[in-house]
Every structure is written in C-alpha cells, then in structure tokens.
Amino acid sequence: MDYLLTWSEGEEVGYKLLSRYQLKGLKIESDKKYSLTELKTGREISDIKGFIEENK
C-alpha cells in the first residue's frame, strides 16, 4: 500500500490504506475532512483532489 487516507465525520474517524491505482477511483465527499499521507516518504498531501487528478 502506498497511501494512508484518513477522514472525519463529526466525532467518527476512519482510515483506509490505498495503492496508487485505488486513488484513481477515489470519491471525495464534501462533508468529510480528509488527510492523505504518502507512506514511503511520510509526506502529507494537502490538495487531495488535485493530486488525484494529476495521477490519473
């Protein structure tokens, strides 16, 4: 797995490990707060939507 996606909805927190391929089909919902971290480097990706578009 290449990336760690975390999100929060109110008090609920979720996470998912994703490969680069899985990022291509990821749907970002506007009512959730997301964080995406590249596991190899530890880099946090601030513009998730832009990053996904660049890597299609």
Image (cartoon, helix red, strand yellow):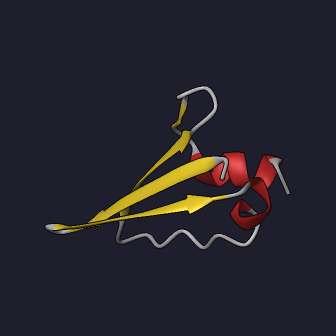
Residue 5, given in percent of the width and then of the height, sits at: 49, 55
Q: Nearer the viewer, residue 12 or 49?
A: 12
User: Which quarter of the picture shows residue 34?
Assistant: bottom left
Q: In the visual, does 38 lie left or right of 30?
A: right
* Residue that sits furthest to the front in the current view: 1
Q: Residue furthest left?
A: 11
Expressed as whole percent of the image width and height from the top left, the position of residue 48 reads: 58, 49
Please tell me which residue is depicted at 54% across the width and 68% down the height of the picture: 28
- The residue lying at 85 percent from left, 57 percent from top is 56
Residue at 17% across, 69% down: 10
Q: 30 or 51, which is in the foreground?
A: 51
For the image, the number of numbered tags is 0
Residue 36 versus residue 44 in the image, above or below: below
Give the left or right position of residue 38, taking residue 29 as reference: right
Residue 24 at what x, y percent from top left? 76, 64
Q: Residue at x 61, y 26 (%)?
A: 41
Return the x and y of residue 2 as percentages of the image width and height: 67, 47
Of residues 31 and 22, which is closer to you in this image? 22
Please say if 2 is above or below 24.
Answer: above
